[in-house]
Amino acid sequence: MLSQKKAYKTLADGRQVDKYIIKNKNNMQIEILTLGATVEKLFVNDKYGNKRDITLGFDDIDSYLSSDYQGAAVGPYANRIAGGAFSVGENIYTLERNDNGKNSLHSNRLFTNAIWEAETIENDSVKLTLFTPDGSEGFPGDISAEVIYSLSDDDSLKIEYRAKTTKPTFYNPTNHMYFNLSGYDSTSILDTVLQINAEFFTPVDENLIPTGEIRSVKDTPFTFLTPIPIGERIDFDDEQLLLANGYDHNYCFMNTASGSPGSANAYDKKSGIFMTVETDMPGIQLYTGNFLKGDIGKNGKAMPFRSAFCLETQFYPDTPNQKDFPSCLLEVGEEFYSRTTYSFSTR
Ligand code: GAL
């Protein structure tokens, strides 16, 4: 295991961004930026033994500040909060409605656009920490957040999240890597074969806010209980697919309460790369890059519509306003802890 830190680039606003690199014995390599605790590059071996960077991102550092959250840590509340408002007890909190002027999305980049403190731990991990004062982007409490990325010699990337707060708040962090298992410069993910071990999902309204229903995937284009290419049904005349212009939905891992992790996997035939996701979070957002519109990313390559997919582990969207969804209320004196691993092999 090899780790390295370097001063990387300076943002137009003068902030310095550092980069941390970890490489394992198989040459799998992760490159992390202190801006947004971002996974900037993720090199994985393909079936021919060649390394491919399978995540979208940018060479131009300032592009990260207005990105589609490529690779970033998102929080304190990932995904949408309806009306940009929620209450805890008697207190009502209002957030920026940065999504169509209607809803809060990804906490208006509070975690994503911050420079995190970082340190290497034991050559295989990078620990990033961020302090956000009470009221930042409307969220209650001084929040001390931590994200740890660890690479193992069996080719898995573990992401651990911890947090404490000085006022009760809803805490729901995620990582927003955009994967293309053929490589960041491939233009489609429609042939990627996906499996999500979840029997239910949360349907949305026209603003992508959950309606509150927890619907069975059975007999719908949303079932990925057996592996099936992402593109096979994505353009079906289905109300939910039309509302989101593809998949942009939360799947429910009902089995997490029993202790077995929620899981999903994806396979790309061309590269032979097989990725497994395991999480203790109760949900996962399948997002098929429906808002990507060809912006220039790494190496001058465009990132077209549906050129990547995300599997964002999370509590369900709009949980603070949905009393029947599993709660992510973090109380004073508690420590939030969650873990997700992305593991890689070839076949
Ligand atoms: C996803 C979300 C999408 C879109 C994207 C960022 O997490 O599900 O609807 O907002 O982030 O472009």
Image (cartoon, grey):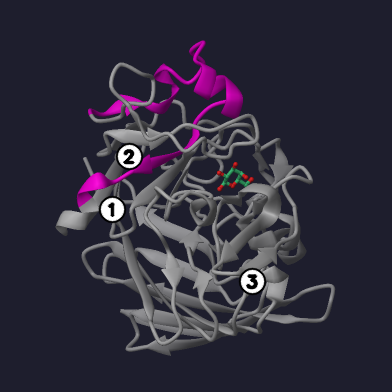
- Determine the residue positioned at 63% across, 66% down: 112
**Residue for badge 2:** 266
The residue type indicated by label 1 comes to: Phe
Q: Nearer the viewer, residue 1 or 213?
A: 213
Counting residues from the start of the chain, the first of labels 2 and 3 encountered is 3
**Residue for badge 3:** 139
Distance CA(mark 2)–CA(mark 1): 10 Å
Answer above or below: position of 246 versus 106: above
The residue type indicated by label 3 comes to: Phe
**Residue for badge 1:** 344
Distance CA(mark 1)–CA(mark 3): 36 Å
Q: Is label 2 or label 1 in front? A: 2
- Determine the residue positioned at 32% across, 26% down: 217
Label 3 Cα crowd, 10 Å radius (few <14 / some 14-19 / many 20+): many
> Which stretch is magenta?
226-255
Q: In the rendering, at what x and y percent does residue 103 appear?
A: 69, 48
Q: In the rendering, at what x and y percent does residue 127 appear?
A: 44, 82
Residue 261 in view of the camera = no
Counting residues from the start of the chain, the first of labels 1 and 3 encountered is 3
Q: Is label 1 or label 3 in front? A: 3
Answer above or below: position of 342 versus 143: above
Q: Nearer the viewer, residue 10 or 93?
A: 93
Residue placed furthest toward the right? 13
- Determine the residue positioned at 59% across, 81% down: 141
- Determine the residue positioned at 37% across, 88% down: 121
Q: In this rendering, would 312 be left or right of 73?
A: left
